[in-house]
Amino acid sequence: MKVDYVEASGFRGYRDPVRIDFASGFTVIDGRNGVGKSTIFDAVEFALTGELSKYKGATAAGQSVADYFWWIGEGDAPKERFVEVGFSGSGGTFKVRRTPFDASDVTISPDIVRALAHPELAPKAPLEQLCATAIIRDEHIAGLSLDLKETERYALLRQAIGANDADSWITRALDISTLAKRRSEAAQVEVNTLSAELAATARRIDELRSSLATESAIAEATARLRVFSDATGTPDSLAGAVRHRMAAVDYELGELSSLRNLLPQFERARASLPDLHTELSLVQRACDEAESALAAIAEVDVEETSGELARRARALISLVAAGRNLGLIEHQCPLCSASHTEQSFQAGTAEAEAAAARIDEIATAIAQREEQRRVAAKALSEQKQRQSTVAAQIMAQEAVIQDVERQCRALGIEGDPSAELIDRRAGVLGVSLENAQRDLRILDTLRLNDELAKAIQAEKIAKERLARGQERFGRARKAEATAAALHDAARRAAAETLDLRLDRVLPLMAELYQRLKPHPVWQDIEYAIRGDVRRFLSLKVGDGLNPQFLFSSGQRRATGLAFLLSINLSLAWSRWQTVLLDDPVQHVDDFRTVHLAEVLAQLVEDGRQIICAVEDPALADLMCRRLPVKTAESGRRITLGPGADGALSVRSATWLKPLPTRAFAEVPQSRTG
């Protein structure tokens, strides 16, 4: 199966529609940078996979390469946006077309997949793997050069060759190993938990055994508790009566403590009561005297107060003074308009002044008597207040005495209580309570026998559970080891399967290296796979020398090119006969470029289709001369560049003519009769 054509419009750098038809033998494409050479290879990969693997899913500023699949340049928008690739071969002709509306949803026909890859030998994603090996880009050559670590080189080689059925077994074995490890960890946690439970049960048994009392101690405690609680009965039935008695004793101790705290107040109350009664008698006598003094001061029975009388007297004096100042007016009084002589007017004003003086004297007398009553009433009020205060003090002290006497009667204390008596009685009760508590604890050990039996049974069960848990843990550990061994075996089997493929790849790598001649001194290179589970691909030249530290940049790239070509040519499951090379001679000199052309010519002779893009027109001419043109459409030369309007296009496309197979033609001989 080979590529017939690529047609694109509005894809990447191609705004206008462009169609490139490929020769069945080889097609050489030239053009400077940026004219769309790599886009031709991108179109093939995009049509088959819907992705561009060379970007490796890179993202930047929230964008990805998917945002740049289609034309986004300036100028007129493309009329159409699509990519179409045609294939032909013994299995028929096929085409794959993608547009922006179905870029990732196109379903590749199973016929195309079968035409490109062997259905039984191909990996799970054959089209992606074919694009990775058939399209040899400048980036891939640099990536697979000698600069890689040996483990990375092996990983890329394995990826390029393709996965095999062992990969699914490795995944399954890894899942089994992971599950077995989790179960082993869970079993370990279970064993630790059960061990902790067994240890806790053993500690409980030790505690119970250490708490058990002897039979003699139990008998003595029972006798003392019977006396304490004033009850009879078996040891098992004494607990209720003992606790009831302990509560009563505890209450009595509380009452004694309260009584002990009241004793200082009680003594002060008894000492102060006689003085308070004496003071109350004196205050009562003072109250009586104050009442008598107040009663001796008679109240003034007048309609007006002393203040009102004084104001009347002052008004009358002011009126008389005003009349005198005015004098008689036409023999009439200015105050009452009565007719008067000068003598009668003076006598009237003098009489008015005398009346004002008498009113003022009466007001002064009334004011003095009111003040006397106020002072007497105040004295009486103070004495009554003092009487109430002393009476309240007496009642408070009597209440303290009565409260103490009530508590004494309740506690059965006769006579006057004393601190010594109360302390002595509280001490006796406290000792009896402590003894009862201790004896009750001894009595409580009877129930520990049942708890001990239960604890022993629990320990037995815990041991059995631990034994089963340890057995499960042992099986889990064994299963984990078996799963790990299975995983390692699957990886080794995958490596062995890969080694079988490498047996075809490595000799081809060495042969291509010899034909490309990357180095003038070291004509041969050795490829070796090391490691059992972790694999390494090492390269040596000469006497075990590392070419990574000997070869120049161009020599390393030439070695990487041999590496990639050998992988493409060794894929047993590939039915795609096309090798696409995107600028394979970057940093490679002309001498080795000629060797590459000879290698490609041999591939064309073997029936491969070569599509190669280069920058240098002279190099393109060289390759067109070196590669064989067998038929009229087996060789093609294409030049890309900007058109008159600046859009990328095909500037020229030429079918190369085959060389003549004969230099001279045979001339038929005439017959003579």
Image (tube, rainbow, N blue to C red):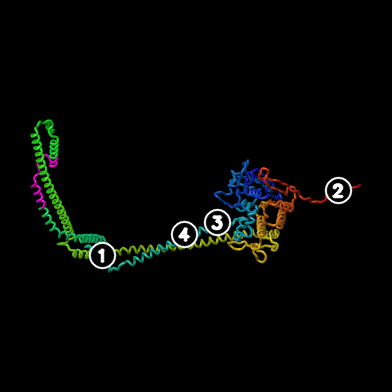
Task: Assign a secondary structure to mark 4.
Answer: helix
Q: Secondary structure at mark 3?
A: helix
Asked if residue 331 lies in the magenta stretch, the reply is no
Left or right of 229, for residue 64: right
The numbered disc on residue 186 is: 4
**Residue drawn at the location 54% of the way across and 49% of the way down:** 62
Whole-angstrom CA distance, mark 2 to mark 3, is 75 Å
Q: Main secondary structure of the magenta part?
A: helix
Q: Earlier in the sequence, mark 4 or mark 3?
A: 3
Q: Which residue is mark 2?
A: 668
Determine whether label 1 and label 4 are within 8 Å by CB.
no
Q: Position of residue 362 (x, y in %)?
A: 10, 42
Relative to 273, is 629 on the left or the right? right
Q: Is residue 504 visible?
A: no
- Write down the residue under mark 1: 434
Drawn side of residue 616 relative to residue 421, left or right:
right
For marks 4 and 2 on the same chain, the one whose residue lies earlier in the sequence: 4
Can residue 287 be seen in this snapshot?
A: yes
Q: The disc labelled 1 sits on which kind of residue?
A: Glu
The magenta span reads 286-311
Q: Report if the CB atoms under discs 1 and 2 are less than 8 Å apart.
A: no
* In this rendering, the label closer to the viewer, 1 or 4: 1
Crowd around label 2: few <14 · some 14–19 · many ≥20 (10 Å): few
Q: Quadrant of residue 194?
A: bottom left
